[in-house]
Structures are given as C-alpha cells and as structure tokens.
Amino acid sequence: MENTNPDRETLRELADEGNETALDRLADLADMADDLAELSDLLDEGSRHAGFLLTRRAVAAGDLRELQRIFDAGYEEAGKELDRLLQAPGGHQG
C-alpha cells in the first residue's frame, strides 16, 4: 500500500476517546467488509458516517424497515429517504 493505515485496534482506541475521524474510518472498514452488524454498532455509538453508509445500502435494497431502524437510531437522513421511497409511485425504487 502507498500510505500507512492505522490498524483497527488503534482506530477503536481513538474512537473510544472521542475521535470522530477514527469512528468514520472504522465505518468505512466495516462497509468494505460488508459487516452490517459493526456498522449498526457504530451508528449506535453516534457515527453519522455509519448512518450514511447504512442508509445508502438500505435505499439500494429498497429496505423500508431498515431505513426506519436507522432513522430511529438517530440518523435523520434515513427518515427523509424513507419518506421519499414511500411517496414514490409503485412503492420503492432500486
């Protein structure tokens, strides 16, 4: 690799200390690994980036229940996407 990437353990330690960039990096790693459980945990920890990544996946899958869950967990954009899909002709898109 061209650049030095901190390992997950270091990112986790930084995130636990309140570093939002480290939390975002953990979300990116979970997204690349298709680890939806970790993404959900990161959302529960307050990661808006995890909310964005989960919302993008739920919209692509047309998963209205997941959008509601993400919105309930505090990511408001998921609620906007849910409303948009509910108002779309024919149910959902994607």
Image: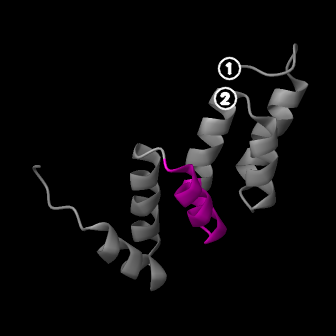
The x and y percentages for residue 6 are: 24, 67
Residue shown at 60%/37% (left/top)? 57
Give the spatial CA distance, label 2 vs label 1: 6 Å
What type is the residue that disc 1 sits on? Gly
The residue wearing badge 2 is 61
The residue wearing badge 1 is 94
Please state the extent of the stretch shown in magenta in the rendering.
35-50
Where 55 falls versus 11 (above or below)?
above
What type is the residue that disc 2 sits on? Ala
94 vs 20, left or right, is right
16 vs 53, left or right, is left
The x and y percentages for residue 18 are: 48, 82
Q: Is residue 42 magenta?
A: yes
Q: Main secondary structure of the magenta part?
A: helix
Q: Is residue 44 magenta?
A: yes
Q: Secondary structure at mark 1?
A: loop
Where 67 falls versus 9 (above or below)?
above
Where 92 falls versus 18 (above or below)?
above
Whichever of labels 2 and 1 marks the residue nearer the N terminus, that label is 2
The x and y percentages for residue 12 are: 40, 75
Q: Secondary structure at mark 2?
A: helix
